[in-house]
Amino acid sequence: PRPPEYPDFATDNTAVKLDGNGAYFALEDSGLQSPFDFTNGDGITLEAWAQLDQLHTNENVYIISKGRTGSNKFAPDNQNWALRIREMKGQACISFLFATVPTSGKAKSDAHWHRWTSSVGFRPGKTWHHIAISYRFGDPKSIRGWIDGRPQDGGWDMGGATAEAPVVDNDAIWIGSSRGGAAANSFRGSLDAIAITRQRLDDAVLKMRYRRVGGEEELA
């Protein structure tokens, strides 16, 4: 994104282009109670500018996440937090995902997964979109999502809303993919200005994140 269409960026601004074939950026976690570790009581806001080339049916592609890298040093379902784009009815909906510790006796095999997805999204294409999710762990009613500065409704599925704490360990932070670089979880397009904030940002702040000359892009 660059001026004049996106006036808040530098004229020589650059982004990263990802091909969807498993490419990702990795940042190692710094250890116990690192700034990337979140548990109950912690607020989080995840943001990014995204230009999505393509999204296949039922795909969940990753923007940024902690855990679930596929490393044999950690449990496979160790998702501390994730900002993703989920395909629903041809739309690119924003989605937040984390896992809790699995417990025996649950009727659903995915009961330890907790996924919130916006009700509407945008169409893949050349347009840049600002997306954001905020949440306070332990308070499922605190979930909030934005596309292009506008709040979005949504809902929980899989294990549903929960007050349980997320799994947290020292697995890495990945941008652009997950699960060892699985194609179905790999972003196809460009990403810029990804941010993690250890507090819940509000509507006023996130509305200001998005400025586009020529008017707002219609959502799907």
Image: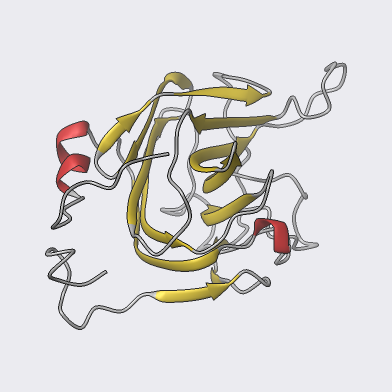
Q: Is residue 47 left or right of residue 108?
A: left
Q: Position of residue 148 (x, y in %)?
A: 28, 45
Q: Is residue 153 left or right of residue 184?
A: left
Query: How is the model colour-coded?
Result: secondary structure
Is residue 127 shown above or below 167? below
Q: Residue at x 54, y 53 (%)?
A: 65
Towards the viewer: 68 or 203: 203
Is residue 55 shown above or below 120? below
Instruction: Residue 55: name its quadrant.
Output: bottom right
Q: Residue at x 35, y 60 (%)?
A: 127
Q: Residue at x 18, y 63 (%)?
A: 6
Q: Is residue 69 left or right of residue 51?
A: right
Q: Residue furthest bottom?
A: 12
Number of numbered discs visible in the structure rendering: 0
Q: Position of residue 174 (x, y in %)?
A: 55, 63
Q: Is the N terminus in the top left, top right, bottom left or bottom right quadrant?
A: bottom left
Instruction: Residue 159: name its quadrant.
Output: top right
Is residue 120 shown above or below 33? above
Q: Position of residue 16 (x, y in %)?
A: 43, 75
Q: Is the C terminus in the top left, top right, bottom left or bottom right quadrant?
A: top left
Q: Residue at x 68, y 53 (%)?
A: 68
